[in-house]
């Protein structure tokens, strides 16, 4: 059956067809039909192709019985098989050829293919320039140099979504980072209420990509929106190629965590709230940014835990049930439910000179990787 896997259908006649012209081609590779991405697809024509492919031996041996009735024509002493599509106001005929080295097998087809490639290349370049120009004007990206921004623009895409489209759904794995260009988007709580509106140039979706945790909270479009989009694969590639982007996106996440905490959690003379409002990673970063010593007490479904911070904001000790140190900290990073209270205070004497468990950002990254590999219940 290998001889029937790869073909090219060529439009040889067209009469009032609203979509296709003579010379246009449709490629079949491994029984998969490929159409042009820049043109609307005619479902009636696709049905005719499917009928032909259902009995592929008719493509080479027209004498055999088939589910369709091809027209046999003589051309330069050789038989060619033409098929007809006349299911709408127009009519086209197409024939089939075995491809050689090039996908396009006619001169006209090759010219069309080359033109399409050039148009696509120019369109892609315009999109990249538009993305770069927009990022350069957003104050948030001021700290990034031109090379870094150009590389990001190379990996990003422009997308449009209708109103009331769920862009990020709580509890689902993160798949994209988004930057709002135009339109309105809102942050949605678990009751379906809009508790924040995103502004032009704001980033969202990066937290789940950085931490590997399910997305929270949900984000939806309140009107038709245009977005710059970076998928998870390209996001990881960007972080690997430009290490400065790690701290850049982590700082964005930390700033958002602080805003969400103030917005969603109860703040008084101390700081307390629910882990449903803020992840422990975000909370740790918020405390680290304060550069004050203190104790974070956690009431979790499986018991009590505590994390101690020195005056530089580094983590120096953690306990969770019978676990201590890094072992306790890494298991804590898997916890998503419970309440917390953070108290700024002078630590007890034995802890004032205690060494940190590790460099703060490196410690969190190590813990997140460990948590992803070993997601088990706490003690």
Image (spheres, grey):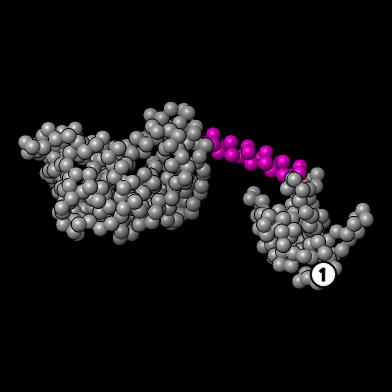
Q: Position of residue 299 (x, y in %)?
A: 16, 54
For image coordinates 64% across by 41% down, the residue present is 120
Q: Position of residue 346 (x, y in %)?
A: 8, 37
Residue that numbered label 1 is attached to: 64
Find the magenta span and give its range. Answer: 110-133
Q: How would you rate the neighbour count of disc 1 (Cα within 10 Å): few for under 14, some for 14-19, many for 20 or more?
A: few
Q: Is residue 221 left or right of residue 74?
A: left
Q: Residue furthest left?
A: 349
For image coordinates 43% across by 42% down, the residue present is 236
Quarter that holds the N terminus: bottom right
For image coordinates 47% across by 48% down, the residue present is 225
Q: Does the magenta segment cover residue 119?
A: yes
- The answer, for residue 48, to whether it is visible in the render is no
273, 327: nearer the viewer:
327
Q: Does the magenta segment cover residue 115?
A: yes
369, 231: nearer the viewer:
369
Q: Note whether 202 is above or below 300 in the view shown.
A: above
Q: Is residue 179 left or right of residue 5?
A: left
């Amino acid at each position: 059956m290998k001889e029937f896997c790869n073909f090219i259908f060529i439009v040889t006649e067209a009469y009032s067809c609203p979509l296709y012209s003579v010379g246009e081609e449709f490629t079949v590779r491994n029984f998969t039909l490929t159409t042009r991405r820049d043109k609307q697809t005619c479902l009636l024509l696709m049905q005719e192709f499917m009928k032909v492919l259902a009995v592929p031996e008719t493509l080479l041996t027209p004498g055999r019985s088939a589910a369709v009735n091809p027209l046999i024509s003589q051309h330069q002493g050789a038989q060619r098989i033409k098929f007809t599509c006349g299911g709408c106001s127009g009519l086209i005929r197409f024939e089939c050829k075995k491809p050689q080295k090039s996908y396009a097998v006619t001169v006209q087809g090759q010219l069309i293919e080359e033109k399409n490639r050039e148009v696509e290349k120019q369109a892609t370049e315009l999109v990249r320039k538009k993305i770069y120009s927009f990022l350069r004007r957003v104050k948030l990206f001021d700290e990034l140099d031109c090379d870094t921004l150009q590389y990001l623009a190379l990996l990003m895409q422009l997308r449009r979504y209708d109103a009331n489209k769920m862009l990020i759904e709580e509890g689902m794995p993160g798949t994209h980072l988004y930057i709002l260009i135009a339109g309105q988007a809102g942050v949605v709580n678990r009751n379906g209420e809009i508790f924040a509106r995103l502004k032009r140039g704001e980033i969202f979706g990066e937290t789940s990509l950085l931490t590997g945790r399910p997305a929270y909270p949900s984000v939806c479009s309140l009107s038709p929106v245009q977005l710059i989009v970076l998928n998870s694969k390209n996001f990881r590639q960007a972080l690997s190629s430009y290490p400065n982007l790690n701290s850049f996106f982590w700082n964005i996440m930390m700033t958002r965590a602080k805003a969400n905490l103030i917005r969603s959690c109860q703040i008084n003379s101390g700081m307390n709230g629910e882990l449903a409002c803020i992840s422990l990673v975000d909370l740790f970063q918020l405390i680290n940014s304060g550069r004050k010593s203190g104790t974070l007490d956690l009431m979790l479904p499986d018991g009590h835990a505590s994390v101690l911070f020195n005056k530089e904001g580094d983590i120096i000790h953690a306990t969770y049930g019978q676990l201590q140190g890094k072992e306790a900290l890494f298991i804590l990073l898997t916890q998503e439910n419970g309440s917390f209270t953070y108290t700024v205070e002078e630590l007890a004497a034995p802890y004032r000179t205690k060494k940190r468990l590790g460099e703060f950002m490196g410690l969190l990254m190590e813990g997140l990787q460990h948590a992803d590999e070993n997601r088990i219940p706490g003690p």
